[in-house]
Amino acid sequence: MTTNHLIELHEHGQSVWMDNLSRDIIQSGQLAEMVKTQGIRGITSNPAIFEKAIAGNAIYDSAIAESIQAGKSINDIYEYLVFADIQNAADILKPIFDESKGEDGYVSIEVSPNLAHDTAGTIAEALRFWETLKRPNIMIKIPGTDAGFAAISSVIGEGIPVNVTLLFSVSDYEKTTWAFIEGLEARAAEDEDISQVASVASFFLSRIDSKIDDRLDSKIITATDESEKAKLQAIKGKVAIANAKIAYQKYKEIYAGDRWQALKAKGAKEQRLLWASTSTKNPAYSDVMYVDNLVGENTVNTMPPETIAACIDHCDIEDRIEMDIDAAYSVIEQVKAVGLDLDLIMMELQTEGVDKFVKPFASLMASLENKVKQLTPA
């Protein structure tokens, strides 16, 4: 009997969430089947996913027509469509949520990407989403920007599960962890229950290697010394995994500390690291490299459908998150030694990441506007 590697991952302490959601997979029963038989234990979504799901898809037409009749605005129509999908997916995943005692079974929905640098706006939208969706297994996605950190603490303090997204640097991951802890501390100070407040920190991977590999290729082209070219070539495709392994070491360090132990004594759950952007962009690399190399206790890997299929077929599961840690630190030092400013690159990636959600969000709104015009009775 063929091993289901997704279930095998769970046996190694890592949960598999799917980075995809549409009405098609809900209504066809595909999502329920994946949850039941393939080991999918959560869903992540973002504006780009919903643009792909909704734009040009006739399955939403009747709901759009109904919204037109009700006189809804374009933004209200967008939320009507998306909220229904989120709620239905949450209902499908509720048994996982119950069985895992609130560890898994979540569906993540992102606040508007236009609020990435607006703390007050992010808090208000997170609260509104939570109160409107009315499901215990919803996670509100908040970007790990400077404005986002204060919002994370506030929303966690309200007892709302948070998925911190668009994390690239270890320093931003550390800020995310302290924002989570501060939110729990504030909640505990009010004698509120903190045992049910779940959170994940979504650490992005493949985009890091794509960006750094491009920089390294430029240096390889201009390098005149063969040993220098070999040194540059040796770093390619290794930075994201090294960076993630170092983040995991930081995770262990913080959660061994006194501040966390005081919260743990009150029943708090750790904020798990979640590996995101796990589809391999470079065809020269393994299509499951961001799965195989980051298997570890108390982590999540959210994969798009193509990576899920590849992993089911040929993942090689072994606890590797804490293997070759010295080599991981060495890779980061080598990046700096060849003249790449890693901090600056990580900042660029986050800025681009926000933009990659802003643009599809605007495109989706434009698509909905056109669809409303088509479906509005003459």
Image: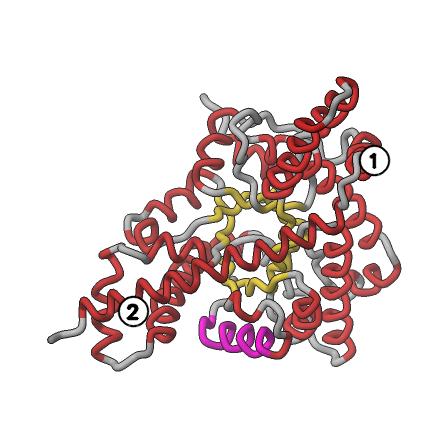
Disc 1 packing (10 Å; few <14; some 14–19; many ≥20) = few
- Which residue is at 66% across, 37% downward? 215
Could you say where residue 104 lies in the image, as x and y percent from the top left?
56, 53
Q: Looking at the picture, does residue 139 appear above or below residue 317?
A: below
Q: Which mark is residue 369?
A: 2
Which quadrant, please, contains the N terminus?
top left
Query: Mark 2 is on which residue type?
Result: Glu
Q: Nearer the viewer, mark 1 or mark 2?
A: 1
Of helix, strand and loop, which one carries label 1?
helix
To which quarter of the image does residue 309 belong?
top left
Q: Which residue is mark 1?
A: 337
Could you say where residue 259 lies in the image, as x and y percent from the top left?
85, 63
Q: CA distance from mark 1 to mark 2?
A: 51 Å
Q: Which residues are magenta?
A: 121-134
Q: Looking at the picture, does residue 120 appear above or below residue 319?
A: below
Is residue 24 visible to us here?
A: yes
